[in-house]
């Protein structure tokens, strides 16, 4: 998935992005409220990890700005404050969850997965489509119980399609979600990865359709189109 990490403490930001990056996720980093607004205006994100104390203001100002724009991206707030009012304020402003510093990176990952599950309506850590299952924790995909051999980038692309089933995803949006804003990859790279993923999903319960001039759409395959 494509995450925005808004954190001005360099070592904390690097620890978060490195940990999530090892899980196959693309992360952009912002150190100020203004930088965060710039990133959020230019790209769509699956999740924002937001520190409250930033050099040019409160992270809650950015959170309010997001919600005023009707941006429903999930937000996980990080805070060094222990006051109950701060936690209540973050949730009232539209945060999905919060963590108090210092925190364990493993717990951060687990909370990220929980937020994604709530947004997709899945009860556990597994995203499914027919006979296809993808475990967000282990990054393992199976078709009819048989493990698929996917690269980290293919795992991320599959996760994106499963989370956004039925939604049309433009190539430029997939570039951002798959590689982040700093990447030099383009639409041709997306075509390459989608083609590889399609071949590996042969017989799976997920169909990735190409909508010419629009992008891609993942749909649960009809029973008579799935073969074992």
Image (cartoon, rainbow, N blue to C red):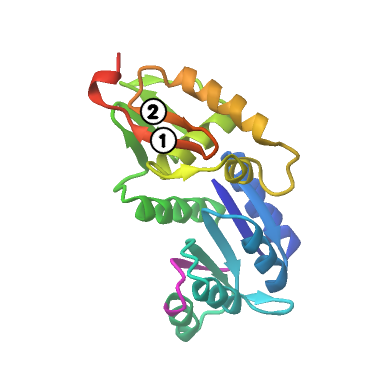
- Which residue does the image show at 69% across and 36% down from the upper left? 186
Q: Position of residue 53 (x, y in %)?
A: 65, 76
The foreground one among 10 and 206 is 206
Along the horizontal axis of the image, is 135 left or right of 39? left
Along the horizontal axis of the image, is 227 left or right of 96? left
Query: Hey, which residue is sitting farthest top in the picture?
Result: 228
Q: Is residue 116 above or below residue 214?
A: below
Q: Is residue 206 above or below residue 227?
A: below
Residue 97: say if magenta. yes
Could you classify mark 2 by the number of other residues whose Cα lies within 10 Å: few (under 14), some (14-19), or many (20 or more)? many
- Which residue does the image show at 45% across and 83% down from the upper left? 84
Residue tagged 1: 218
Mark carried by residue 207: 2
Separation of disc 1 and disc 2 at Cα?
A: 6 Å
The stretch of residues the image draws in magenta is 92-101
Q: Position of residue 180 (x, y in %)?
A: 66, 46
Residue 197: say if magenta. no
């Amino acid at each position: 998935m494509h995450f925005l990490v808004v954190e001005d403490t360099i070592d904390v930001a690097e620890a978060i992005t490195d940990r999530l990056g090892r899980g196959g996720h693309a992360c952009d980093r912002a150190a100020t409220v203004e930088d965060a607004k710039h990133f959020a205006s230019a790209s769509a994100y699956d999740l924002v990890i937001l520190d409250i104390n930033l050099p040019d203001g409160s992270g809650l100002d950015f959170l309010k700005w997001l919600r005023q724009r009707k941006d429903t991206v999930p937000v996980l707030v990080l805070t060094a404050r222990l006051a109950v009012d701060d936690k209540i304020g973050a949730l009232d402003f539209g945060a999905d969850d919060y963590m108090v510093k210092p925190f364990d990176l493993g717990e951060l990952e687990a909370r990220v997965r929980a937020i994604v599950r709530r947004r997709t309506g899945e009860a556990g850590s597994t995203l499914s489509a027919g006979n296809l299952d993808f475990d967000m924790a282990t990054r393992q995909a199976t078709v009819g119980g048989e493990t698929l051999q996917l690269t980290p980038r293919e795992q991320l692309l599959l996760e994106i399609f499963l989370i956004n089933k039925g939604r049309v995803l433009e190539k430029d949006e997939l570039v951002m979600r798959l590689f982040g804003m700093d990447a030099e990859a383009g639409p041709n790279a997306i075509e390459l990865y989608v083609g590889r993923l399609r071949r590996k999903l042969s017989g799976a319960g997920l169909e990735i359709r190409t909508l010419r001039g629009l992008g891609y759409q993942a749909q649960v395959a009809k029973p008579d189109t799935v073969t074992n």
